[in-house]
Amino acid sequence: MIARFFLGVGLCALMLVSSFGTYMYLGGRHSKVASPAEKPTAVSPRATAFRLPGTIYLAQSGAIYSLSVGRFHQLTPQEGWMQPSVYPDGNYILAVKRNDFYSDVYALGRFGQVVRQWTNNAGRLNDTTSQHWSFYPRLSADENTLWMSYDEPKFGYDALFSIWAMPLGGSIRQARLWTNSNDYTGGDIGPIPLATGGIMYTKYSYGPDGNRIGQIWLTTRPAAQGIEGRPLTSPEEDCMEPSISPDGKLVAMICTYEKQISQLTLATWNGSSLGPRSAVITDQLVAQPAWAPDGSGIAYLAPGSANGPFQLWFLPKERYAPPPPSPTPVPTPTPGGPYNGTLPSPTPAPPVTPPVIKPIQITANSGFDATSPISWAG
Amino acid sequence: MAGSLAYFLPSAKLAWDATGQVVSIPSPTAAPSPTDPSSPSPTALAQPKDAFTVLLLGSDDDDKFYADHVLTQSMILVRVIPSTHSVIMLSIPRDLYVPLSTGGTGKIDGAYSYGGAGAAIATVQNDFGVHVNDYIWIGLLGLIKLIDAIGGIDVVTSNPVVDDLYPQDIFSNNPYGYSRVAVLPGPQHLDGIHAMQYVRSRHGDLESDIGRSKRQQQVLIAIRQKAKQVSPGDVPSIAAALGGEIKTNIGLDRVAALIPLAASFDNPDAITSLTMSSPLIHGGCPGGSLCPNWSAILALVRQYFP
């Protein structure tokens, strides 16, 4: 009788253990699709395996991070910060702070402390049409002009971005409108001030097939002075997010060909037009290319695996600018004077297949904001 | 066994509540439909190797509406052809002025409001001559929760989506208020809220509802891509997230058969996205609705939904 009692208890215990074990096992079979992104500073092991030169600034979940000497540092709290851009002199960082209704441009110290607010877009409470967005801030080389995308003029439902140039420290009333955005397209974004005085930016419009497309544009004078510049890319290429190399001779950009793909595309740049295109990455959803200040490669954002949060990647220069082939060896003179006999036919050198340079994944579990350009300082 | 039961209990409850919905199809009204009126109701397929058509319905289901009397802001006919691993999506403009299966004429988005899924299906079947095998209805919150439950989606947003008069009817005490939206362009990872903003905003779009339909199709494709990574272990959390925000007539047995089928659709070029714009439709119908050019519409539908 006692033996049967203990057998029953044992079986009950076994049943409980196996049920619990099954429950835990199934719980452990979760895929990682819904795992939240980790803060870059929490990456373990730290991203020391491959060190990028200089300091990279980028945004994740409303905070700005820097990456230097293989380590991430969180510069701001997670309070809507994005789109960092280092001042030309390297002493401060321009950044956008956005909330649900408006966004403003600030100057931050190199350690993330707020130094000054450059725009005031709050508008009136409960009047959404009086509130404004400022995005993609950049400073001119002399640090006197703040370039940005700003949603003015807007007409009722037709809210869209235009490119504005505002005296740094001035107000929006002192700013000059530089582009004439196309109605109901979203407008013009991402100004890059050029040494020649103009700007390169992305303009959205309706393409010949009726779809919305992006084009890289160049303009050298404010819109009020006449016809706005001209496109540098075709509607079919559907390009955006241009970035000019440190030597000013190449432009990296994202082209999507009106599909749910993106290709990292390079083109030569002579200051007024883009040369032949070269797609250097076609198998990733690439965003926000940024050139290394020393010209050693291009950083960009792309998912670490298919359909995941965006990680930081680096494409070494050797991928898109392979070294020139080795010179043909010159035969060394044979000691002993000239030889008049038949020369042996030279053995052809075996063809050398250059190694394929692959992009290097810098982070694995982060979730960087792919709408926030990367800023890379020397 | 007990552990499995406990683990899958939430999804089983959702499955019981949401799937296998019995739809009542009103008698078809006179319509330019080649559909056999003797069998207008959705039918289960014997094998998923046969081509089938699903009607996707998306609704604002916030406090402005009575439960189950909502408009379908999004109506997308999806034809799945397993033999060629191809998919065809056709967005139906919500403002299309059509004969309704419940009687009379009106905007097609009202069909669901007047008679539920059955009326919406019958209206589409009668007017477009398409046999609908299945339907899936999802509410605003359901889409947000679904996308969050699968960890967000990767989308190339085609342009900045800026809207100063975006409805503030989710997570708000005032469903008639306005919010501001600025979805920035380019490749990015969208969570549920921002994906919703991207597919729902229409004020800054010259094509209005048609432009929005194109964005909805982009997001649908992204959801399908991401869903391929979901494992059975994720089902309970997804089920818990979706509670009450999704309805379908598809039974659990069909769901089980369709999951591997969905995973086998890998070629993005095998997905055809169609919208109805001029000359298929034109303005000028009552109440700001869109007038259908039936001969052009039916020619398109017969081509892709034989």
Image (cartoon, coloured by chain):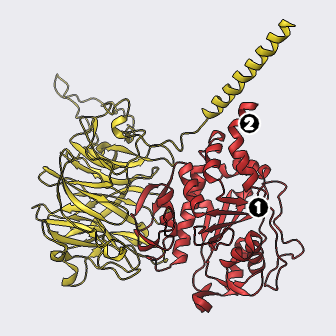
Chain colours: A yellow, B red
Foreground pick, B18 / B47: B18
**Which mark, residue B5?**
2
Residue at the far right: name it. Answer: B38
Badge 1: few (under 14), some or many (20 or more) residues near its Cα, within 10 Å?
some
Alpha carbon distance from label 2 to label 1: 34 Å
Residue B187 figure quarter: bottom left
Q: How many tags in the picture? A: 2
Residue pictured at 59% horizontal, 45% vertical: B229
Q: Toward the viewer: B19 or A358? A: B19
Residue B204 x/y as whole percent: 43, 76
Q: Position of residue B218 (x, y in %)?
A: 54, 63
Describe the element under mark 1 as helix, strand or loop: loop
Q: Which mark is residue B51?
A: 1
> Which kind of residue does numbered mark 1 sit on?
Ala
Crowd around label 2: few <14 · some 14–19 · many ≥20 (10 Å): few
Query: Which is nearer the eye, B177 or B288?
Result: B177
Residue positioned 74% across, 82% down in the render:
B100
Residue B37 appears in which quarter of the rendering? Answer: bottom right
Which chain is mark 1 on?
Answer: B
Disc on the earlier residue, 2 or 1? 2
